[in-house]
C-alpha cells in the first residue's frame, strides 16, 4: 500500500506561482503513474496532470503551458509547478499514485486559493 502526503498549497494572487509536492511512502517500489486531480467548490473532481515513471507527462488543456508536472523517483516525490495562476485554478488539489498491481492511492488534499 502507498501513502501520499501533499504540501505546498496556499493563497496566491492572480498571476502568481505555487509548487505542490507529494511524497510517497510504503510500497513505493511498485508505483507506476503519479499525478494530480483537483476539486473546486461545487464541482466534480477533475484530472489535472499525470507523469509516468519515465517522465512522460500529460495535462488537461486548461493548464497546458502554465503547469509543469515532474517526478523525482529517488525521493519518491511528484511535483506540480503552477505558474500564471488564475481564479479558476482555485481548488483542493489531490495527489494520486497508481500501483502496478492495480488500484489507486490518494493524498489528503491541499488547498490552493487564487485571489483576484
Image: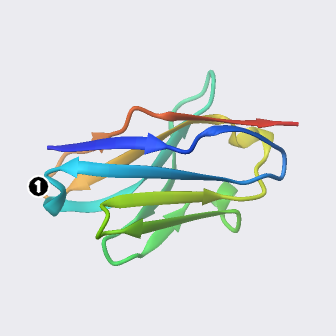
List the single residue furthest toward the top: 42
Compared to 30, does 5 lie above or below?
above
Q: Quadrant of the N terminus?
A: top left
Q: Position of residue 44 (x, y in %)?
A: 53, 30
Other-residue count near label 1 (Cα within 10 Å), few / some / many at <14 / 14–19 / ≥20:
few
Compared to 102, does 70 lie above or below?
below
Q: Residue placed at 32% from the left, 43% from the top?
A: 4
Q: Position of residue 45 (x, y in %)?
A: 51, 35
- Which residue is nearer to you in this view: 20 or 59? 20
Q: Is residue 56 left or right of residue 75?
A: right
Q: Is residue 68 left or right of residue 98?
A: right
The colour scheme used to paint the residues is rainbow
Q: Position of residue 13 (x, y in %)?
A: 83, 42
Q: Residue placed at 48% from the left, 44% from the top?
A: 37
The answer to which quarter of the image holds residue 9 is top right
Q: Quadrant of the C terminus?
A: top right
Q: Is residue 98 left or right of residue 22?
A: left
Q: Residue placed at 39% from the left, 32% from the top?
A: 108
The answer to which quarter of the image holds residue 103 is top left
Q: Residue placed at 66% from the left, 65% from the top?
A: 64
The answer to which quarter of the image holds residue 94 is top left
Q: Secondary structure at mark 1?
A: loop
Q: Is residue 76 left or right of residue 9?
A: left
Residue at label 1? 101
Amino acid at each position: 500500500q502507498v501513502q501520499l502526503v501533499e504540501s505546498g498549497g496556499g493563497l496566491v494572487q492572480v498571476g502568481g506561482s505555487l509548487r505542490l509536492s507529494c511524497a510517497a511512502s510504503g510500497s513505493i517500489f511498485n508505483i507506476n503513474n503519479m499525478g494530480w486531480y483537483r476539486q473546486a467548490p461545487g464541482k466534480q473532481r477533475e484530472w489535472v496532470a499525470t507523469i509516468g515513471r519515465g517522465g512522460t507527462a500529460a495535462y488537461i488543456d486548461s493548464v497546458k503551458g502554465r503547469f509543469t508536472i515532474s517526478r523525482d523517483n529517488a525521493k519518491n516525490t511528484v511535483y506540480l509547478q503552477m505558474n500564471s495562476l488564475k481564479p479558476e485554478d482555485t481548488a483542493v488539489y489531490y495527489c494520486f499514485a497508481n500501483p502496478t498491481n492495480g488500484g489507486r492511492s490518494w493524498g489528503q488534499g491541499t488547498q490552493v486559493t487564487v485571489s483576484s
